[in-house]
Amino acid sequence: MGLFGFFLLMVIILAVFGLGWQTFSSGVITGFEKAVDVGTPIVKDLTQEARNYVNSPEQLSTTQ
């Protein structure tokens, strides 16, 4: 992990210097928003199940 972490850190630093901080951060934020906004029904169902479990864990519906 040491060499991989160092390589990843250097790529990020070079990207920030090459693109500029504002462009880099807006690209990261846009990418994060696209990754979080997944429109598939399976992901929406799982997200709703997780929210229901967090709100009231005793009401978890199990389907077999």
Image (cartoon, helix red, strand yellow):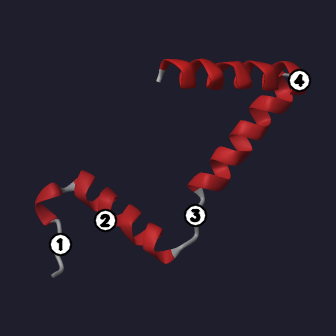
Q: Position of residue 40 (x, y in %)?
A: 54, 73
User: Which residue does the numbered mark 1 point to in the structure image?
Assistant: 61
Quarter-wise, where is residue 25 in the image?
A: top right
**Residue 44 placement, left or right of 56:** right
Q: How many residues crowd mark 1 within 10 Å: few (<14), some (14–19), many (20+)?
A: few
User: Mark 2 near mark 1, Cβ–Cβ under 8 Å?
Assistant: yes
Whether pointer 1 and pointer 4 mark residues with C-beta atoms closer than 8 Å, the reply is: no
Q: Quadrant of residue 42?
A: bottom left
Which disc, if any, is residue 49?
2
Foreground mark, 4 or 3, reads 4
**Type of amino acid under label 1:** Ser
Q: CA distance from mark 1 to mark 4?
A: 50 Å
Q: CA distance from mark 2 to mark 3?
A: 16 Å
Quarter of the image for the C terminus: give it. Answer: bottom left
Task: Report the Cα–Cα distance between label 4 and label 3.
Answer: 30 Å
Q: Dot 3 surroundings within 10 Å: few (below 14), some, or many (20 or more)?
A: few
* Dot label at residue 18: 4
Query: Which residue is tagged 3?
Result: 38
Disc 1 + disc 3, Cβ < 8 Å: no
Q: Residue at x 55, y 20 (%)?
A: 3
Is the Cβ of the residue at disc 2 closer than 8 Å to that at disc 3?
no
Q: Which residue type carries mark 3?
A: Val
